[in-house]
Amino acid sequence: MKAKSFVDALETWSLRSGSMHVRLSAAIEDAIRRGTLRAGAKMPAERHLASLLAVSRTTVVSAYNSLRRDGWIESRIGSGTWISRNRATEARSSFRMKELAQSPILHASGPNIDGIIDLASAMTPPLAEAVMSSLVPSEDHAKRMLTDAAHMPYGLPELRASVADHFRRNGTPTDPDEVLITNGGQQAISLLVALLLQPGAIALVENPTYYGALEALRLSGARLSPLAVEKDHVCHETARQKMRALHPQMIYLTPTGHNPTGVTMPESTRSMLAKHCGQYGVPIVEDEIMADLTFARRKPRPIAAFDCAEMVVTIGSLSRVIWPSLRIGWIRASKSMIARLAKFKTAMDFSCPLITQSLAVDLFASLSEFREQRCTELVERRNALTDLLSECLPDATFTVPPAGLSFWVRIPGIDTRILAQAAIRRGVNISHGSLYSINDSHSEFLRIPFVLSSDLLGDGVHRLRMALDDISGHSKDLAYRTPPAERLKNTGTQVVEYATALSML
């Protein structure tokens, strides 16, 4: 490993607490845990590293001695010093399991508990009639599946053509060769993150954002730099400045029906972002999984519609409109990118199941009808939840979402992590805002979906009101004011933010 790359992996290590050698050894240990410094990599010579860090050689020697004593590095006279393979591999595995252990997805996917109203999950119920009528593939599709190749890494040709046509109808010229079929939107996100990011790389990520994407990004070992989501989504000028200052390897955005806030990005911002990513050579991963759940007459064009440099990669899915368990997703990108992704995907699975792909072809034929049916249902439930929140949570602030599946509700002065504990005792499960944050912010927010029936929504919000009353009568520790955003903690994300601020002065 080059010494300068080693130094980059330590980020702004000197801002940590403790003596200089303690700060240095802690930064090296954290980089090993994240995978930014890999098992077996050779460490820089003590004198050379001291010169690069502008510290005394004694500081480096003390840091190395501490790491050697704890088993993080090994040395041999005449061979130098390297990162211990056993300890680094074990630490990296533990780091990944720590991230996965916090996953709300596994908990949300578990069995329903009697008496608990789920205001945490944003999974739409299946459009049962639509699915039932298409469960048996047409005779033509059945013959094709039985006579064609057993594995289709790129996806069923008819389905790729349907997805391409779906993009063309919304103003984005697309060929079937520019489409890869995936096992749902989550696999699409994971594939792109794994292909585009290496440990220690920087990714720009909207904040807050979808927690499934956050998990994939964190497991990559990348450093995440936030783009604040406001009433009109992210600021394209802020994104441009960060592209120039940080040289990120990827940007992740959900421009339509943003999860969790529901905001939708104006087309003018989409156009500027496409221009910036072409100028700086930064790929945009555009998550359009919620795009068909927009309640306006016209669905906005994706960022890809404005992309002249083939730097925008768009993902989508049928899950939210038709059936979450269908597990049909796709990636739209340049032909060369699709070829790379297909090779990458075969390392995970050879092909998505042909039977569900065939089912999806039939469903695509009536997608506009299904979209209208789903949106009509959701608007009724959104309006019901609007009234409930105004009545039961008068101190809360929120904006009625123009798309998506959820409200992003702020309850001033309340730590919603504490509220979630009180709520479950009242029989309602909620998602606190920190789950969707890349830097442990948004602790005064809740995501409240409107996928349940009006009766269940009403019961759930009333139980939430009782939980709020429960904690308001306790100690002042339960009332929580969000700390200033400027307060630094020793996390990779916030260190990147501090470096960003310095670079923009």
Image (cartoon, helix red, strand yellow):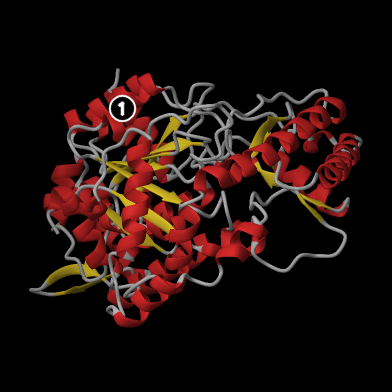
Residue 447 appears left or right of 149: right
Residue 406 appears left or right of 419: left
Q: Position of residue 422 (x, y in %)?
A: 83, 48
Quarter location, residue 77: bottom left
- Note whether 134 is above or below 196 in the view shown: below
Residue 129 appears left or right of 384: left
Instruction: Identify the residue shown where x is 31% and y is 54%.
Output: 161
Quarter location, residue 191: bottom left
- Note whether 472 is above or below 160 in the view shown: above
Residue placed most toward the observer, 504 or 290: 290
Q: Which quadrant would the C terminus be assigned to in this image?
A: top left
- Note whether 215 is above or below 372 in the view shown: below
Tell me the element at label 1. Answer: helix
Residue 275 appears left or right of 133: left
Q: Which quadrant would the N terminus be assigned to in this image?
A: bottom left
Q: Position of residue 281 (x, y in %)?
A: 18, 36
- The local crowd at label 1, few if under 14, some if 14 to 19, many if 20 or more residues have their Cα within 10 Å, is many
Residue hosting label 1: 273
Q: Position of residue 347 (x, y in %)?
A: 29, 73
Residue 27 visible, this angle: no
Instruction: Identify the residue shown where x is 59% and y is 28%.
Output: 402
Quarter location, residue 381: top right
Residue 53 visible, this angle: yes
